[in-house]
Image (tube, rainbow, N blue to C red):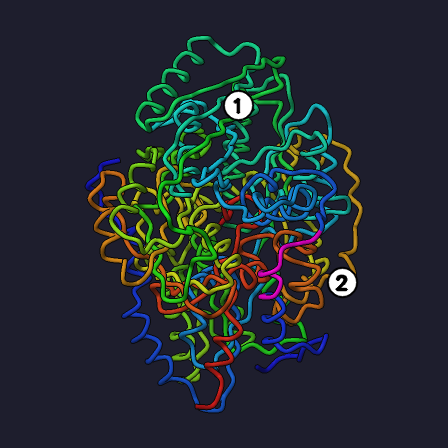
Amino acid sequence: MEGNGSPVGRSEEEVLDAIEERRRRPRRKILDEQITLSHGAGGKSSHDLIEALFLRELRNPLLEPLTDSAVIKDGAGRLAFTTDSFVVRPLFFPGGDIGELAVNGTVNDLAMAGARPIALSAGFIVEEGLPVADLDRIVCSMARAAEAADVQVATGDTKVVERGKADGLYINTSGIGAIEHKLPLGPDAVQAGDRVIVSGPIGDHGMAIMIARGDLALEVELESDTAPLSELVADLLAATDGVRCLRDPTRGGLATVLAELALSAQLGITIDEASLPIHPEVNGACEILGIDPLYVANEGKLVAIVAPEAEDDALAALRSHRLGSGAVTVAEIRPDPPGLVLLETSFGGSRVVDMLAGDPLPRIC
Amino acid sequence: MTSGATVNGGMRFVDEYRSGDLAKSLAEQIGGLVEPGRHYKFMEVCGGHTHSIYKHGVEDLLPDEIELVHGPGCPVCVIPMGRQDDAISIAERPEVIFTTFGDMMRVPASHGSLLDAKARGADVRMVYSPLDALKIARDNPDREVAFFAIGFETTTPSTALTLKRAQAEGIRNFSLFCNHVTIIPAIRAILDSPDLRLDGFVGPGHVSTVIGLRPYHFIARDYGKPVVVSGFEPLDVLQGVYMILQQLRDSRSEVENQYSRVVRDEGNPLALRVIAETMKLRTTFEWRGLGFISQSALKLREEFADWDAEVRYEIPGVRVADPKACQCGEVLKGVIKPWECKVFGTACTPDHPIGTCMVSSEGACAAYYNYGRHAGRRRRESAPT
């Protein structure tokens, strides 16, 4: 390349190598002086916070894999254990509400360990002034969601805080589930050649929430995809032994889940852009807002990494279930480049897909 | 949503401009126009182009002889540190709700970003349009709402319209911190810079919907460089490059319009009128990296002083030098590539940016980093076979 040469004597390839090294290596300390919203966006800053603070101080073999659920050996069997907090605004949105989300979110974290959910806990932090009718509606919706997922809410807690100290209602749910299969699901089981399947169109939940906030003045009919995935997972695991790893692409979207997976498996992932399932409404809204649907949250979709010979059976099993009817293969695991996700664009180019930096903020012109 | 909706993101008026087959054939035609051994440097002026080029991997389709140089047309990138400090000083006033486009929230100023100010207690809210900010003012009559107005001629008309609406409705608890800039003086500064030899310009599409084609004629006439105003889809950019090459082959230097589905030669007279009614040129304005450029930015007219945040609030207004290590200026001028900056990818990353070019998704550094190419692939491609 012509130009002024490099002021620091690094060639472009050396700089790219250095960046790739950086992408692969989590930060060892937090550079920020205070917590900002970026730390909660599910991308790089969240990752740094977990690695550089929570994992540093709380490290143990159960926590360390940082998967959706911890897997606890219990005598001859295995239990999955997980927790999640829900702070969504607005509390009610097209396709669901915070209560349904709180049940499904934890059920799905258990399902990603291949576990059958047994029991949930529910902790409510309620702001003074919340209409009882709203809380009633939310708890009814939790009950319906628990019934649909065949799980009991076995214990709970309620705290009320002064007006202005919480945005209406926050809910935390934890859950335990029984692992009844023998597979060692997880990033360690993933191998080069494996296929990456998503169970349906991506980005519905995140865009539905953005639209429901009403700040965008966009008129799009979009519903959250919130749904319990345990039955879908059970069907999938019954159909094939070739499942290597399951993830639910919530906050940070498909891109973040795949970037994390590439990092922990130390394998490459190549996404075929043309194969990505995205509803036109979601794609259109993302296009207008300058947001990449790869980074938009899902609440009723799973990512399954399966052995190449299991691909057809896995797709057939997913597609025969209502919640997996849109399942397609979107990517392949490759030996190279270790720890990185690449995307082959429909246009004929290629690029790196990294974890999200900051919030998925829109471009402004 | 209907479950029968077509999936795979089919989007009319968008997919047509992302077709891989068309791209391949256009790339072949481009290859046919390139003189072997000649090195071509084209500047894409607008950050929207830069973003699209990286996002879709347009450079992968171009022959090695063609180098795309990223220009200054990224609204977030050109705001100097001092103005960001001023914005934060307004945001930190207890009576103020400070509204801003999302990208500006992460731009580092002397003491952290607006996001940091928000974490310290400032009421900073992200909006998608100045009209949203006006709505917040309407809904919060006991607070003062300020809007951080930035951008080139693309976004200026919506700010101007908001101002007129605030006046018409008599909304007094609303003000604008005006940082609107104009693209032509920046292009002229780059043409006059001795650091850079360019062979042509991929002209800004959306700015041109407002200003039309006439303002670019001096580039073709006085500097002898082809200008092709182009759209933002990857095929638009490729076609823009193709049209520049045709001009060079024919030894022409003209202003051409690739983006005729959106841009009219005369621009948008209505938008220009509303800008002229509400704003006027500043004598001079500081651009990040480019320094002070005369008559390159807009401020509110005196009739709108009641809505002018610079009149309403005492702001520091201090010129602050960029961090020493930061080379955003050279990147914005196209003098260096993002990766040639000393701190690129080491001290300066999208999650902890030092300069503006690493913040905005239209910034060359952020685009290069986030949508970066894979080093191994490049090596394999360039290795002799």
Query: Range of the magenta residues?
Result: A20-28
Q: Residue at position x 63%, y 55% from top?
A: A26
Residue situated in front as seen by the camera: A71 or B84: A71
User: Does the stretch in magenta take in A21?
Assistant: yes
Q: Residue at position x 54%, y 9% from top?
A: A129
Q: Which mark is residue A170?
A: 1
How far across and how far down the image is residue A107, in percent? 40, 33
Q: Quadrant of the N terminus of chain B?
A: top left
SS assignment at label 1: strand
Amino acid type, callout 1: Tyr
Position of A239 with respect to B294 (left or right) is left
Question: Which residue sits furthest front?
Answer: A75
Category of crowding for the residue at label 2, using alpha-carbon neighbours closer than 10 angstroms: few (below 14), some (14–19), many (at least 20): some
Residue situated in front as seen by the camera: B379 or B330: B379
Q: Is residue B379 above or below residue A134?
A: below
Category of crowding for the residue at label 1, using alpha-carbon neighbours closer than 10 angstroms: few (below 14), some (14–19), many (at least 20): many
SS assignment at label 2: loop
Q: Which mark is residue B325?
A: 2
